[in-house]
């Protein structure tokens, strides 16, 4: 059991420092902290961001999407192994389940937030004890 936990922790630590060969244009920044990874995304026009990753233990991953009033995103989190759990945080948007597809949410930015022309829509992912997942964000 300890060997399995060690392998999972090693996998998580190596995934946090592995850089993609070429970052997609939607990725503004990737920041790593002790037990959190933050991916900052922006879409100039309709487009797609997709990433396969692993998560587990106390580690969490956040995908922050820069949204402007009336922007609409479709977010899908597909678990490949284990169960990746997700939740949304932020202000100035609503999200609804897309009844046609499992683990898919439609996010609509409703208004300017405190006079700012944009808001950050954040998707938090976690798993216990471990999950491999694919997150896909489409700007509609």
Image (cartoon, rainbow, N blue to C red):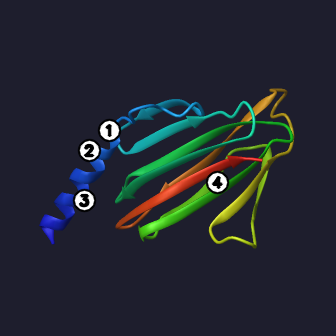
Which numbered disc, 4 or 2, marks the residue that appears first in the sequence? 2
**Image quarter in which the N terminus is found:** bottom left
| Residue on which disc 3 sits | 8
Residue 18 sits in which quadrant? top left
User: What whole-number distance in Å separates the C-alpha atoms at marks 2 and 1?
Assistant: 6 Å
Residue 18 is marked as 1
Tag 3's secondary structure? helix
Q: Quadrant of residue 96?
A: bottom right
Confirm or deny contact between disc 4 and disc 1 (CB under 8 A): no
Q: Which residue is mark 4?
A: 88
Name the element at disc 1: loop
Q: Circle 2 sits in a helix, a strand or a loop, which is it? A: helix
Is 138 drawn above or below residue 97 in the view shown? Answer: above
Between circles 4 and 3, the one closer to the viewer is 3
Side (left or right) of 116 relative to 9:
right
Q: Is residue 138 left or right of residue 79?
A: right
The answer to whether the residues at label 2 and label 1 have Cβ atoms under 8 Å apart is yes
Residue indicated by mark 2: 14
- Whichever of callouts 4 and 1 sits on the residue coming sooner in the sequence is 1
Cβ atoms under marks 4 and 2 closer than 8 Å: no
């Amino acid at each position: 059991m300890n060997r399995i936990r060690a392998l999972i922790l090693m996998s998580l630590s190596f995934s946090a420092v592995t850089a993609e060969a070429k970052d997609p244009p939607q990725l503004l920044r990737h920041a790593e902290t002790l037990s959190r990874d933050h991916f900052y995304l922006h879409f100039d026009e309709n487009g797609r961001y997709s990433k396969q990753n692993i998560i587990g233990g106390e580690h969490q991953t956040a995908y922050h999407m820069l949204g402007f009033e009336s922007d609409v995103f479709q977010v899908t989190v597909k678990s490949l192994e284990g169960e990746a759990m997700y939740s949304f945080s932020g202000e100035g948007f609503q999200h609804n389940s897309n009844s046609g597809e499992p683990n898919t949410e439609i996010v609509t930015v409703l208004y300017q937030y405190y006079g700012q022309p944009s808001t950050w829509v954040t998707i938090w992912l976690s798993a216990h004890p471990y999950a491999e997942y694919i997150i896909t964000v489409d700007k509609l």
